[in-house]
Amino acid sequence: MPVTHGLCKSPEYAAWANITNRCLRPTHPSYERYGGRGITLFSGWVGRGGFARFFAYVGPRPTSEHTIERIDNNRGYEPDNVKWATHKEQMNNTSQNHWITIDGVTKTLRQWASENDIHETTVIHRLDRGMSEREAIFTPARFGGRRATKKVA
């Protein structure tokens, strides 16, 4: 009798199955954005035993908030390029982010704004009006005008 991993109903298995389908099955709705544009699945994680090897590499999902992320979005699902990440972490790993470097520290506009308790839209408007990145991030937000610029938790 074959030995099975017993995880076919687990979120880890679901993640692996979704990756496999997106990368390898042309009829999958997301194939064009993955396999169709060259995003591959590491050959050791394909076919019989593929899930077990994938699971051995990534381990259990840390929390229900975590999903699999490619660290470099131009590379495939392969060792050293996948990790469990929260949605917030994944949003900081998109090509649409506005990256800002101040004093040698690089973060997304959203990260800078959050850490300095200022709404990211305020930072964007300030940049559009010609403020430097440093000024846009570190100038305190004003209150009492038409719109409050401080972000509400």
Image (tube, rainbow, N blue to C red):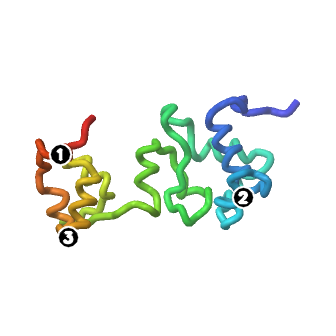
Residue 130 image label: 3
* In this rendering, position of residue 119 left or right of residue 37: left
Query: Which of pointers 3 and 1 indicates the residue nearer the eye?
Result: 1
Q: Residue 31 location in percent, x, y?
A: 71, 57
- Give the spatial CA distance, label 2 vs label 3: 49 Å
| Residue 39 found in image quarter | bottom right
* Residue 8 lies in quadrant: top right
**Mark 2 highlights which residue?**
43
- Residue 57 location, x and y as percent? 59, 47
Q: Nearer the viewer, residue 138 or 69?
A: 138
Dot 3 or dot 1, earlier in sequence: 3
Q: Quadrant of the N terminus?
A: top right
Residue 146 bears which disc, if any? 1
Amino acid type, mark 1 = Arg
Front-most of 39 and 133?
Answer: 133
Q: Earlier in the sequence, mark 1 or mark 2?
A: 2
Q: Looking at the picture, does residue 76 appear above or below residue 17?
A: below
Residue 99 sits in quarter? bottom left
Residue, x 69% and y 31% (percent of image)? Answer: 7
Mark 2–mark 3 CB contact (< 8 Å): no
